[in-house]
Each structure stands twice: as C-alpha cells, then as structure tokens.
Image (spheres, helix red, strand yellow):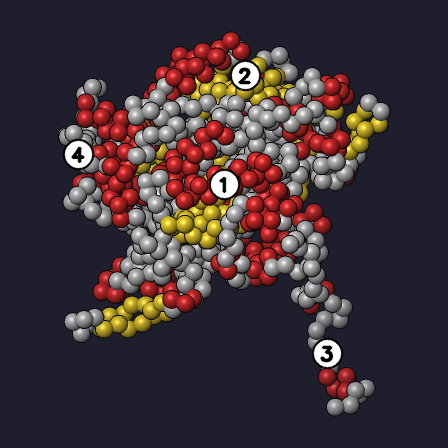
Amino acid sequence: MPKHETPMLDQLESGPWPSFVSDIKQEAESRAKNERNIEYQIPQDVCEDILGVLELSYKHKRTHWKHGGIVGVFGYGGGVIGRYCDQPEMFPGVAHFHTLRVNQPGGKFYTTEYLRQLCDLWEFRGSGITNMHGSTGDIVFLGTTTPQLEEIFYEMTHKLNQDLGGSGSNLRTPSDCVGEARCEFACYDTQALCYDLTMTYQDELHRPAFPYKFKFKFDGCPNCCVASIARADMSFIGTWRDDIRIDQEAVQAYIGGELAPNAGAHKGRDWGKFDIQKEVIDLCPTQCMWMEGKELKIDNKECNRCMHCINVMPRALRIGNDRGLSILVGAKAPILDGAQMGSMLVPFIKAEAPYDEIKEIIEKIWDWWMEEGKNRERLGELMKRQGFQKLLEVTELKPDPRMVQEPRSNPYIFWKEEEVEGGWDRDINEFRKYHQR
Amino acid sequence: MAFISSGYNPDKPLEDRITDIGPRKYDEFYPPVIAKNKGKWLYHEILEPGVYVHVSETGDEVYTVRVGGARLMSVTHIREICDIADQYCDGYVRFTTRNNIEFMVDKKEKVKPLVDDLMSRKFPAGSYKFPVGGTGAGITNIVHTQGWIHCHTPATDASGPVKATMDVLFDDFRDMRLPAHLRVSLACCLNMCGAVHCSDIAILGYHRKPPMLDHEYLDKMCEIPLAIAACPTAAIKPAKVELPDGKKVNSVAVNNDRCMFCGNCYTMCPSMPLADDVGDGIVIMAGGKVSNRLSAPKFSKVVVAFIPNEPPRWPQTTATIKKIVEVYAKDAKKYERLGEWAERIGWERFFEKCELEFTHHLIDDFRDPAYFTWRQTTQFKF
C-alpha cells in the first residue's frame, strides 16, 4: 500500500518511453526494503513524498516548491540550491529538499566504479534521485536536508576527489561535446580545454562575483552538438582554415552506392540512389564544389565549413589539418531581453595548452562585464547596451568583416573625437566671419 | 535514523577542508579503446537505429549502443546501468548531452547480445528501461528542465510532458525515416534552463496571469527595489498599501497591461507568485536549430500561443507535436531541417499544412526584433 495515492502519475507508467514514475517507485521500494541495511540520513520514505507532492501538483496544476533559501557549503557561493516544500506537513520527507550540482567529468565518460560511489553516497545522504544530467551539464543530486550538505561535500572531496559545480552569479559548470575522444569531426580537444578552464577558474566557479551567470561551452565542430552557440556566454566552436581532405576513391564509393551517405543516418526510408550533385554539390551554401570527371573539387578558400558535405560523406571528406576554434560571445535564453545567439568575436584561434591567448580574451571580457554589467545583466545584454565596438575596444581585437552578418545600414556612426581631424573644439566667431547669423 | 558524521567538524569547518579541486579528470574514465584512439578516428557509420561504429586509423573500432533515459533517474536505475556496463563494456559507460546513455564495446559480435539485453529490460508497468535508438534522421531524447518535481517557477511540469511526448514520438526514436534529425526540447518556464529557443520543436511552459501581491509580507520577504528593477517592461512601481486592519505597509503595484508574464519579479521576490492552474500552460515553438550545417543557426518561432496544462498526459500538446512531425516527414526534402523546410515553403504554408490557427499572438510585438519579423516584401503565397 503506497503512502500516497497517485492515480494521475500512475498513468505515466504505461507507454514505451522509460517511465520516471516507475523509476521513483522502484527507488521508494528499495528504500522501504533496505536490503543493504543503510542508515539513511534523510527520511526513508522520501521518494513516496516526492511522488505525493508531484501528484498534488498534477491535481492543482501548480508547483509546490517554495522559493530558494540561502543554503550552501562553507566558503562557496554556488553548487547548492535551496529548496523547500510548501506543504511540509503533508510531505515531511521532502520538507527540505535541496539540490547539489556535482561537476561532471568531460565528455560524460564514467567508470561504473565511480558511478557506484556516487550512488552509494547519494542513497545514504540524500533522496537517491538524480538528474543524469542537468541542462548545464552537472550531475544533479535532487533532494537532501541542510545538515547533510557539509557532510556530502566532505565525503565528496575527501573520498571521491570530486567538487561541486556552479550556480548563481558565477561561472557555471563548463561542458563539452564528446570531441576527439570519439568523433572524427572534432577540430580541437574539447575535453582538454574544458578541463583546463574549469580548473583555472575554480574561484570564479565557486564564489559568485559576477553580475549574473556566465557559461562556457565547447563544441568540437560547427555541428554544435552541445548547442554552445545558443546557450553559452562564450562558445568555443572548433574549425579549420586549410583544405578539406578528400579521398577520391571513397567519393566514388559513395557515388557508386557502396557506401551509405550521411553515415547511414537516413536508412529508415528509401530515398533512392545517392546523387552527389543534388545532395552535396547543389546544396553547398557557397557553391564551392564541383565534379571534374571523376574527381570532386573544392575551392577551399570559398568554403564556409558548414559541415554538410563532410556529414554526408564522412569517409571521403575530412576536416582540415590546420585546426583551431572560433569564439562566439553573448548567447542566452530569452530572459530578459529576448533570446540571443552567440556573435562571432574571434574567427580563428589556435587551441593549444596552456591556452594563454584564450584566457587573455576571457579575462578582458570579464573585467569589462564585472565593471559595467548591471545586476542580472548577461554578457549578451551588455554587448547590446554598450555596442560591439566597446567589446572590440576592451578585448583589443581588430574589427573584421567575419564578425558581422553585414555592415550597418545606417550611417549613425559614433565618431570619436580623435578619429576626426582637428577635433571638436572650433571657434564659432571664426565660423561667423563667413556665415552670417 | 542516527546521524553519522562524514568526519566534518562543524565547530572547525576549515579543518582538513578540501576545496577547488574541480571535477574528476576526463581521461580517468576513458574506456581503453577511447584512450588509445583519441584524436585518431577516421569515420563513423550508423549500423541500425541506436547503434553506430567509429573506426580509427589504428584499425580499432568502437561500437556504441545508445539508449534513451529519463534524465530524472534513481540510484537503483544507475546501478542497473552499471551492471550492464560491467557485464558488456568492461565497466565503462557515458552519457550524452541529450540525456541518452551510451554503452561502448570494441567488437561487432558484442553488439547484438547487448542490444537484446537492453531491449528486454522493462519496468513492471511495461515501459522500456533502456530503449535503443536516438540516432541519425530520427528523433532523439528530449532535453528538459525540472518542472513540478523540483522547481519553484515552472508554468508546466517537465518529466510528465516529456514522457507523454516521447511515448507519442517513440517510433521515430527507434527509426530514421525523417528528412533530417529533429530535436525536441522542453523548458518549464521562459528562464529556459533547457535552452529550447533553438530547437526544431520546443515545448515551453508559460504563465498568463500577472503576479499576485502578498502585501502583508512583501516588504519583509523582498528587497522592493530589486523586484522593481527585475521587471523588463517597467510594469512594477513602489506603492504604499493599506492592509485590511488599517496598517500601512510598503509594497509594490503592478501595471498589469504591461506585464509579459516572464516571472522575473517572482525570481527576485517570493511575495509575487504567478502560478495559476488556468493561466499556466504550454507554448509550442518550431523551426530552430543550433547546427551551422547548410543554413545558419535559427531561433524557434512561436507557432501555438497557448495549450492548457492537461496532466497527466497533455494530449493536445502531444497531438500538436505529432501533427507537425508527420507533415514535416511527408513534405520536407532530404537533409532539410524543420525550420529550413518552413522557410522554403513559407510560414503561411506551414500553418496551412500543419492545420494550425494563426492568431495575433504569433506576431511579434516585443521591442526591436519585432519589426524584422514582419513581412517587408510583396512576395507571399496565397
């Protein structure tokens, strides 16, 4: 007999997709049985109460979680999000139900040994319910009580060699794509750069000193699997500046039908015979490809590296060898001033340890934003308020047409005095000698 | 339930304290075949939905089996993932950005037993624990936010609508029949922890009623200037309010006509809640993408202004999404993403084909970007 009736949630147990309701029920059952004789540090029936409070939300069509609350671990300003239930008498197991963000490993690779250690810790000192993973990338521990926070942090740092992630007005936990670890499109080692910057900026990650949140995301190529261009204040997107490598034999194998186009991604439907002209050459956004007899030619100088031809024929075409990354800045979701996409700031930079040049740009941007940014103003909003020119000024970068979609269509240029010969101090009386009032 | 100390001494919090050690280093967790071949991969191929192979210049191969996961996951479930990874993958596993789980093996003959095992595991009520799929020109897992399970500002649930939607789209998780891949995302309010604003199809929770004002507590709970400054449309101003008992308190007044229901005031001030059973619901957005392939990344556009919250299975929401997916599947050209298709045929045609009503809510009236979305040409379709 369950602690709370959950007739609506029960309807989410049917259907093929993994049911989170069934999963929470299995955790509730596991805690009730407690076959491992665990001395649970938060209420044993916490999972029953999670289901209970969620069922109540399904009935009321409103959340039953209160606003935050300042909780955390000593010396850190992030990594823990306070959460309290607004019906604590009905659901005492989740009356205090704080979240911890745990900084995930790069590429989200795990050993089962380590995952089991995380599970043991979280079952013992928390609800046993997680997010694998949160939107920013962290491992998210959902629900524990205030006294457990320091205990969890102590065990994590002492036994698991593991730190918390970011929350609040600080550097949020950086995240990356699978990159060179298992992808032939990766133009730089996303995990190495992500880890290096995460470690370099531990202080910024744990101790909020920024106007608002700040996100780094690392995509190995312009396919952007971690969506950095849409959601990172600074996105690092791999690219190359020499020639696409061509294997002409493999091109012929695609044309001849021996190799499946698009790495087999369209196998679920009969799209007819592969047509390189129609599917690759004619779709190329810069029209920089053509066939010369049996040879595929690419005018690489005109290529904008959209990845389409490489995605379609990965065995014939490969990224170039002179690789690095582009830095785009200012992406954010709609709150407050509308959504913004990242804007190109650095078209090409090498991504080689110790990444000093990249760090220099990051720190110049932070100095500007920390000085000028208003409370809760994202970098993208500051860029809009003070202008792209200001961003160039603080980063000491040279303007480049690659930074814009098109030049401005109004002439309202804020000329600076030093740019105009003779400056702005003029003699009105001298002027009047030639121009009557 | 006796309290068990970790060793932490609350009287001396700095004693033996370890801080700023960051995450575990990525390469501690690489499977041997990944460690050996990092940076040496030549190409990949999707062998069947959910199964792909990467081939290295060393001749090594890694076969990956991708399964969907509800990102809300118990430790019991994670341990089952570990058991599978121990049995088939030498104790290694990874997760993807879109909450999928990937099991990797180094030999082709190891794939089938693994896939068969994964597909055989079901929860007692019948749903798959580890459905194989989510690759290529199909629909992969939905990235989403917390919703009613854990968040204080949501306008809808997250895990429930995601489960209901993925049940409806499940065939396309297990197949690759679409013109291109199609990404569905959900954010339970427009804070958009899930960054759904660049997805092929986005499910967004939205409030439609201005905040209620808890005058008696507002000045005690909130910094009034912060609440005022939080409003992007300057709809909030300071106010002296007389309570029913005659007591005068400092509070705020809201110009309801200027409210666009973002909830930013509530984030700054808990005495201004917006949540409402009738006011809250779902916005459907479509046509966004983050990839730079062929066309530039695009924002998703609002195509349905409001669908009520219908727990537990949100039938109108899932039916709308299914309809858009089916029309797109039938009508778009190979390689065309949903947004590219809509732009080619024209949005007027998109609404016609998807049988969606075009209401005034869908015309942008929020600041500068609005003008750029109006039609400044005589080119349109009847």
Which amino acid, by three-letter code, is at mark 3? Arg
Instruction: Please give the residue where the numbered disc 3 appears in the rendered image.
Output: A426
Number of residues whose C-alpha sits closer than 10 Å to that of mark 4, classed few (under 14), some (14–19) or many (20 or more): few
Instruction: Please give the residue where the numbered disc 4 appears in the rendered image.
Output: A3
The answer to whether A179 appears left or right of A21 in the picture is right
Which amino acid, by three-letter code, is at mark 1? Lys
Instruction: Residue A270 in the image: state x and y as whole percent.
Output: 62, 25
Q: Chain of mark 2?
A: B
Report, in whole angstroms, how far the alpha carbon at label 1 lies from the one at label 2. 37 Å
Indicate which disc, 3 or 4, sits on the residue closer to the N terminus: 4
Number of residues whose C-alpha sits closer than 10 Å to that of mark 2, classed few (under 14), some (14–19) or many (20 or more): many
Which amino acid, by three-letter code, is at mark 2? Val
Same chain for mark 1 and mark 3? The answer is no
Can residue A146 be seen? no
Quick one: SS at disc 2? strand
Instruction: Please give the residue where the numbered disc 2 appears in the rendered image.
Output: B62
Instruction: Residue A95 in the image: state x and y as whole percent.
Output: 21, 42
Report, in whole angstroms, how far the alpha carbon at label 2 lies from the one at label 3. 74 Å
Indicate which disc, 1 or 2, sits on the residue closer to the N terminus: 2
Q: Chain of mark 4?
A: A
